[in-house]
Image: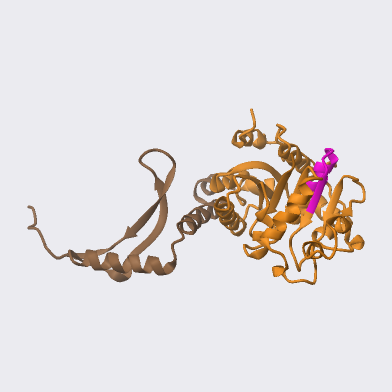
Chain colours: A brown, B orange
Amino acid sequence: MGLFDLFNKKKSGDYAKDRLKLLLVSDRANCSPDIMEQIKNDIIEVISRYMEIDASGLDIQLTQTESEGGNGTVPALYANIPIKDMKTKSKPVK
Amino acid sequence: MSEVIVITSGKGGVGKTTTTANVGTGLAKLDKKVVLIDTDIGLRNLDVVMGLENRIVYNLVDVVEGSCRYKQALIKDKTHPNLFLLPSAQTKDKTSVTPEQMKKLVEELKKEFDYIILDCPAGIEQGFKNAIAAADRALIVTTPEVSAIRDADRIIGLLEANEIKKTDLIVNRIRMDMVKRGEMMSIEDVVEILAIDLIGAVPDDENIVISTNQGQPLVGDNSLAGRAYMNICKRVLGEEVEYLDLNDSGFFKKLSKLFKKSN
């Protein structure tokens, strides 16, 4: 194995660990795909009042993040919402 | 004071029955009076792993139904006079026993035995509920695989919900050569993810297959798995035991930090 591989190739053990961590977050939250779909639709509805978004490109998932209190990781809802256009445009700043 | 231990995993095929046979035999070698109960009704296996399949007369269902006294159903081990097996029924269905019946039976067995070890079936249905009903503590067996660890996490949650406070982890079938290459999750990874105390790790050792072929648990012999199981037994008794070096890199020295009881 070259030095290049050492830094770039992620091993299957790491993949397993990362997959498991994500899997367990949603398992432990007991959050069904149905509920995730509902949350997604509600988010689309609310955001759409203020801006034009690409609903098909919207991606939400349960993940985990370092807590601000510094006591390990906590579950977090991650949402990636592509904005097409701001409906209430502010004037461009020169 | 006797202790009731359930050996469980959620997923099938990770080594519950092998672990039950070895932990039970090991505790008997350490001079405890031990009874093993196979609670997997319909899929009896512990008798075969113990090499006692030819001696079965009565079984667990006969005992709880009152067809015989429990002493008639207990099979004495071939080599350890203080080790007994209560076999499961092969032909009955798994609703034949209730958690209440298990509790009652275990209460009776407590009068006579130091350790009552319950081999739990895979899954989280009736058989699982029966097996955990009377347990004081649990040993959770997992392998370093995504599916097994996921199921173990589910089991840990269910045990907590059923107020089994003491749960310890056994990481089974670890292959240090693969861990070194990064192609298998390490014991540290598994412990970190499941966040419960580790009581031991057992290497993937062909001697396990050989001992199962012979119906003779290998605990206490000179193989790596045999030593790993004996260490687990000593830790069950509350002894502090150094962690086995499953390879020469000192990995286990680093690992020992993870154990509550060490240093």
Visible residue check, residue A3: yes
Q: Which quadrant of the structure image shows residue B73? A: bottom right
Which of the pair A43/B168 is nearer the observer? B168
User: Who's the residue at 88% across and 58% down the image?
Assistant: B72
Image x and y of residue B32, in percent: 82, 40
User: Who's the residue at 43% across and 62% down the image?
Assistant: A31
Tell me where the magenta segment starts and ends, as one range. Answer: B23-36
Which of the pair B180/B194 is nearer the observer? B194
User: In the displayed structure, would residue B56 be above or below residue B171?
Assistant: below
Quadrant containing the N terminus of chain B in the rendered view? top right
Image x and y of residue B227, in percent: 79, 40
Query: Outermost residue toward the top?
Result: B263
User: Who's the residue at 58% across and 49% down the image?
Assistant: B163
Image x and y of residue B6, in percent: 69, 51
Which of the pair B83/B19 is nearer the observer? B83
Is B94 covered by the magenta stretch?
Answer: no
- Please indicate whether residue B126 sits to the left or right of residue B214 in the image: left
Is B33 covered by the magenta stretch?
Answer: yes
User: In the displayed structure, would residue A74 be above or below residue B241?
Assistant: below
Q: Which quadrant of the structure image shows residue B27? A: top right
Quadrant containing the C terminus of chain B in the rendered view? top right
Image x and y of residue B191, in percent: 58, 44
Visible residue check, residue B223: no
